[in-house]
Amino acid sequence: MKRGWIGWSALAGLALLAVGTWIGLFVAPAERHMGDVQRIMYVHVPSAWIGMVCFTAAFVFAIVSLWSGRRVWDDRLVGAVEVGVVLNALLLVQGSIWGRATWGVWWDWDVRLTTSLVMLLLFAGVLALRRLADDEGRRASWSAVATIVGYVDVPLVYFCVRWWRSLHQVQSTPETVDPAMVLPLRLNAIGLLLVAIWMASRRARLEGARRIAESAAPPARVVSEEVARA
């Protein structure tokens, strides 16, 4: 089967993740205070970044879906939300591991951790809500509205450490991080973005195929009557 540009970009993303992780584990220096524990940052921070990128893409897809009424945007919304939920869950697991090593606890109801958990629940709720609607149009509109509402928490997650006191540090910049640490972060972030695009695209395609198959299938009542006559 011919591989499209998204497939090739996913392979490039995996290569970047491999290189970035290797540099982060074996080349970048250990952090002055946390030591080698800090190296989880090279997967933790990209998971946070790309997860929020996925939710932002879903927010845009939701607006376009409501505005245009085209189901292809609902398919793309599903792909972006599902990948975002997976990355958000990984983010919380990685953060718990890091927190246990640095704070001495697996979990703390810190503002960054709490808003990140709420973000996961809100977008998981979007996926759960889809299962409650049998009508295709209602499913798309409910999902779009729920995504727009849920997105309110995304900027809150990003800015909360600036607005309130938090155990979590304020976002660093390339000027405040050792250049040897910046490179693996960027490589892993770009690599994870490319892989996430591929995963969301594949999921959107599967959702479109499911929707077409569902619309082509005869109504359940017709099927039951045919079975009864047989």
Image (cartoon, grey):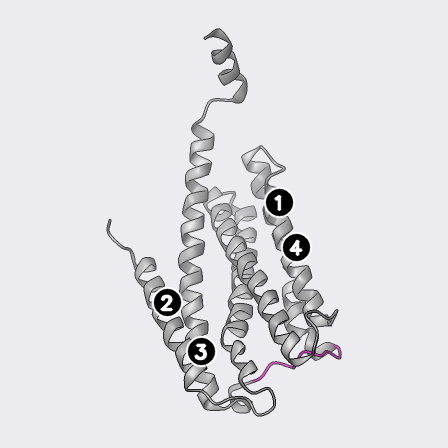
- Quadrant of residue 98 in the image? bottom right
Circles 3 and 2: CB atoms closer than 8 Å: no
- Dot 3 corresponds to which residue? 186
Q: Mark 2 sits on what residue? A: 14
Q: Earlier in the sequence, mark 1 or mark 4?
A: 4
- The furthest residue to the left: 2
Taking the image as shown, residue 60 lies to the left or right of residue 118, namely left
Q: Name the N-terminal-most of marks 3 and 4.
A: 4
Q: Nearer the viewer, residue 67 or 104?
A: 104
Specify whether residue 152 is in view: no
Span highlighted in magenta in the image: 164-172
Nearer the camera: disc 4 or disc 2: 2
Q: Where's residue 39, x and y in %?
A: 51, 80
Q: Residues within 10 Å of mark 4 (few under 14, many from 20)?
A: many
Question: Residue shown at 51%/12% (left/top)?
Answer: 225
What is the number of the mark on residue 122? 4
- In percent of the image, x 75 and y 79: which residue is there? 165
- Picture coordinates of residue 146, whole percent (x, y): 64, 50
Q: Amino acid at mark 1?
A: Ala
**Residues at discs 3 and 1 in contact (Cβ within 8 Å):** no
Evaluate if marks 4 and 2 touch, with contact meaning CB atoms under 8 Å apart: no
First of labels 3, 1 by sequence position: 1
Most extreme residue toward the top is 229
